[in-house]
Image (spheres, rainbow, N blue to C red):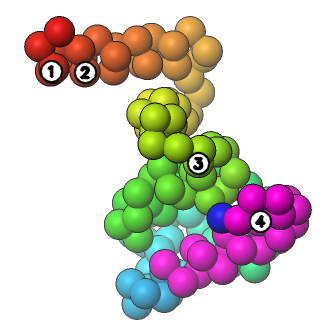
Amino acid sequence: MAPNITDTERQVLFGKYLKQLREDKGLSLRDVEEKTKNQVSNAYLSQVENGKISQPSPSILHALSTVYDDPYEKLMIEAGYLAAKDSSARGRHQARAATYAVDGLTPDEAHAVRAYLQLYRRQRRGG
């Protein structure tokens, strides 16, 4: 999204973005509710799409990213949870986005997840 926009403008744009994703998939609000196994109610999604809910939770965004086949990290950025800065920050954003996907993580647990991901990546690179 464009920098220097108000929170209200961001939530309206984000709602339109989510609505476009849903319509591109040919889904109704009720279809999304069913596909998310009632994690996202049609009434709630309608309010998000109409800009009445400012920032859906990361777990809601994760469910929508799966249904819409849109990257979770992108939804987190569009919703205002993460800032898209540059490609060097991408890995940090992905790790942060992964920790948001699980409800109720303590800061220590989130730190442990990030540490594990760093270890895993080093091992995959052979270093």
Residue 124: give its label.
1
Q: CA distance from mark 4 to mark 2?
A: 34 Å
**Magenta region, residue range:** 2-21
Give left or right: position of 80 versus 63. right
Q: Amino acid at mark 1?
A: Arg
Q: Which mark is residue 121?
A: 2
Q: Residue tagged by mark 4?
A: 10
Quote the CA–CA distance across marks 4 and 3: 14 Å
Q: Looking at the image, is 14 positioned above or below residue 65?
A: below
Q: Are dots 2 and 1 in contact, CB under 8 Å?
A: yes
Taking 81 as reference, is 30 above or below it? Answer: below
The amino acid on which the numbered mark 2 sits, given as a three-letter code, is Arg
Q: Amino acid at mark 3?
A: Ala
Q: Position of residue 30 (x, y in %)?
A: 51, 81
Residue 11 among those drawn in magenta: yes
How far is mark 2 from mark 3, CA to CA? 22 Å
Q: Residue at x 50, y 56 (%)?
A: 74
- In primary-sequence order, the first of circles 1 and 4 is 4
Q: On the image, which quarter does residue 118 sit in? A: top left
Marks 2 and 1, how far apart in space? 5 Å
Any mark on residue 84, and which? 3
